[in-house]
Image (tube, rainbow, N blue to C red):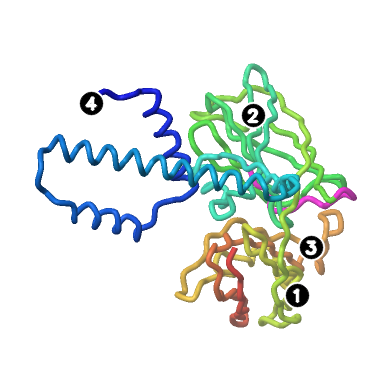
Amino acid sequence: MPRNQELETRLREVADEFDRGFPATPQLNRMILLRVDRQPQTGRRSGRRLVAELALTGLLLVGGVALAVTMAHTRSLPTAPLQPAASVKPSATPAPQASLPDEDLRAAGLTNVAALVMPEDQQGQIGVQTIRLIGSYADPARTVLFFRYAPNVGTPRVRVSDAEGLLNAGGSADGGIAGDYVTAVDAGARVSEDGLGHLAVIFSLMRGPNAVPPPPGEWRFSLAVKLQPATALPAPTPFALGKWNVTVEKLEATPAVIHFQAMLAGATPDAIQMSTLDLVDASGRSLRAMGGEASLTAPKTQSNASTDNNTRVDYQWMRPAAGGTYQLRIQGPGGTRTIVLTVAPI
């Protein structure tokens, strides 16, 4: 039978509005299906099709009437005043993180605290060689700087000072990926009034590969670093270890290392061996040593027979991410002393 296209379009629009206003339910669907199944199955196919079309048209008309009644009822209801949209407070912007290769982080012993390595972007020149500072990390026990340059023209040598003077401590320089170097000073910067450590760095290059002299000169730059906090660990009172008298000055855990500093009265620096201090886990396995130094407590200008027997040791071990209980063993001429440490997870 011919169809009125405009009427059909309008009926379908009304049907869509009806569906939104009165969504179908499973019970109604079942009732309609049961009703259709009870219809006689006799008659021509065209007759059944005509009946179905008329039924559909009737349903659409009924739906349109119901929708119109609903809309009229809705218009009669009082309109609630519009409420302003709730304001969303912006979340705190996380501190930027340095995107450094894993090899660099492993060389620095900072794999477990990669998120605390800050990105840097300073560029210097020594001769025709361009050097970039690409990252930094600092805590009360260590100051670590990441450099990048190519080709490899020499191992970096750095002197680091803060607002109070030179960080006079041991250190290291290790390679990461090709062209990257990690330098560390086994001391933390002293904090200024603004809560930051203000560093002045003098960068130069030592002898390069195959004994090739590096380009002469140095690069001087400055930067401000935020020192990550350290947690003090329980330390024993002074104790005797044979001829040595041991006074623990620092025993702490920074995010990166477990740090031990003590004064050994009666010990000379050359008496401190690799086996003198060791930090082991519950299975007896030694933690990775990140730094170790033994030096006279008195300046060289004040050195004499009595002060030459007072040695300060400063050791650091990489802090395990999982934490746990560890044993710090100090071996002296009169035996061994064990200090038990409990370190929280990072």
The stretch drawn in magenta includes residue 187: yes
Frontmost residue, 98 versus 294: 98
Secondary structure that dominates the magenta span: loop
Q: Nearer the viewer, mark 4 or mark 1?
A: 4
Alpha carbon of mark 4 to alpha carbon of mark 2: how far? 83 Å
Three-letter code, disc 3: Thr
Three-letter code, disc 1: Thr
**Quadrant housing residue 4:** top left
In the rendered image, the vertical position of residue 303 relative to residue 339, given as above or below: above
Q: Nearer the viewer, mark 1 or mark 3?
A: 1
Q: Earlier in the sequence, mark 3 or mark 4?
A: 4
Alpha carbon of mark 1 to alpha carbon of mark 3: how far? 13 Å
In the image, which residues are magenta?
183-194
Residue underneath mark 1: 247
Which residue is depicted at the point 79% across and 62% down? 297
Circle 4 residues within 10 Å: few <14, some 14–19, many ≥20 = few
Which residue is depicted at the point 15% across and 34% down? 46
Which residue is depicted at the point 45% across and 75% down? 283
Residue underneath mark 4: 1
